[in-house]
Amino acid sequence: MVASCKDQLKQVAICLQRSPCVMIERNTPKECINNPELSKDLPDLCKAQLATFLECKRGIVDMRKRIRGNGTLSTGKFDEQYKKLSDGDFDPREEMKKLKTLDSNRKQ
């Protein structure tokens, strides 16, 4: 994968791991994205990050951006956070607090 899209991919992965679709309903992130019934309940932040990632991927094949470059190289900003979520080394209560922050625009 091109280095400029790695940060966006990890942002999407982290957001999906914290989403109610994965954390509470126990669906896979792929199911949450591909199933229209499940994807409508994703937090807006996850949808925006997914759109940013897809735009980055489109920029890889865009001939105009190939000359100038697609974007900055990966900074590794989300590597540690992604590794902890992937390994299961996280506090569920803390993740639920972050989930509520992601879902703050939804009426309760």
Image (cartoon, grey):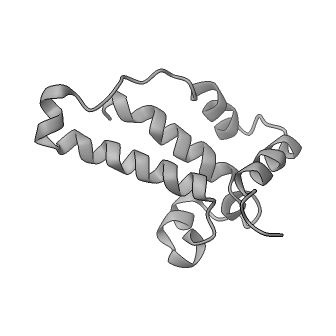
Q: Position of residue 93 (x, y in %)?
A: 88, 45
| 101 to 37, vertically: above or below | above
Q: How many marks?
A: 0
Q: Position of residue 107 (x, y in %)?
A: 78, 69
Residue visible at 66% across and 31% down in the picture: 81
15 relative position to 98: left or right = left
| 65 to 13, vertically: above or below | above
Q: Position of residue 104 (x, y in %)?
A: 75, 56
Residue visible at 52% across and 38% down in the picture: 10
In front here: 101 or 26? 101
Q: Position of residue 6 (x, y in %)?
A: 43, 33
The image quadrant where one finds the N terminus is: top left
98 relative position to 70: left or right = right
**Which residue sits furthest right?**
93
| 48 to 107, vertically: above or below | above
| 76 to 11, vertically: above or below | above
The image quadrant where one finds the C terminus is: bottom right
